[in-house]
Every structure is written in structure tokens, then in C-alpha cells.
Amino acid sequence: MTLHKGGCHCGKVRFEVEAPAEIDADRCNCSICRMSGYLHLIVAKNDFRLVSGQDSIETYTFNTGVAQHYFCRHCGIKSFYVPRSHPDGISVNVNCLDPVTIAALNVTPFDGTSWEQNIHKLSSLSD
């Protein structure tokens, strides 16, 4: 496991996440992920730590309200959130990780426009 660091565009929100150096990410085509260019790295909550910026985070929810989309109120970047598919985990936007610790990136397309039929295809939480 590697300690990756990342954050939002303006730098007010910073976090750390324990994950492999070779990252397997999902590219979802649902409306919010497609529009924001989000690449999902889903990890257990214990593998994620908010380092700074708690006071800069706003929350957006829609549809079922289960997913908690966190974004920086200053620059608007969503660098992580609690996904509906894994409410006991965190989805980190790989695009918001500092690239220095990423040895390789493998991206798998995910059909989020048909979420209910495809949810079983998402990666499970890291142990």
C-alpha cells in the first residue's frame, strides 16, 4: 500500500489515502461523473484521512440522497465523496491525487447510466 496525497484545485481541501501504487479506477458515465470527469478509487473509510479544509467543504445530494458529494466551496472541485454503492467507504477522484505516487493507472469503464443493472460490477472496498 502507498500513501497518496491529494486535494482540490485551490488547495484548501487536502486528504491522504492508503491505496496501491498501481491504481484500478472506474470511469462512470452517469451524468454527474461524466460532467465532472470523475475517476473512482473506492476505499474503506479507515484508509482515508481529511488533512485540512473541513470548513471549506459543502455537500450536494440528489436522487436517493444516500451519496454525499463533497466539494470545495472555494474552487468547486469534488475530490472525494461517500458513494451510494459503498456508503461505508469513500470514493476518491484519482484526478485529484498528486501524481508522484501513482505508478500506473488502469481505468475500467462503468455504465452508470444503467446503475441498478451494473452495480455488481463495481470494485469492492479495499480490505
Image (tube, grey):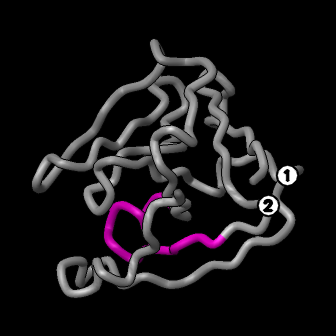
Q: Amino acid at mark 2?
A: Ala
Residue tagged 1: 101
Q: Among all residues in the image, which is located at the extreme left?
A: 64
Q: Position of residue 93 (x, y in %)?
A: 56, 53
Q: Amino acid at mark 1?
A: Thr
Pair 2/1: label in front = 2
The residue lying toward the viewer, choosing from 72 and 101, is 101
Q: Residue 48 occupies which quadrant of the picture? A: top right
The image's mark for residue 14 is: none
User: Residue at point 50% right, 84% down?
Assistant: 109
Residue tagged 2: 21
Local packing at callout 1 (Cα closer than 10 Å; few below 14, some 14-19, many 20+) is some
Q: Is residue 25 magenta?
A: yes
Q: Is residue 52 magenta?
A: no
Which span of residues is magenta-colored?
Answer: 24-37
Q: Is residue 122 above or below residue 59?
A: below
Q: Where does the N terminus fall, quadrant-wise?
A: bottom right
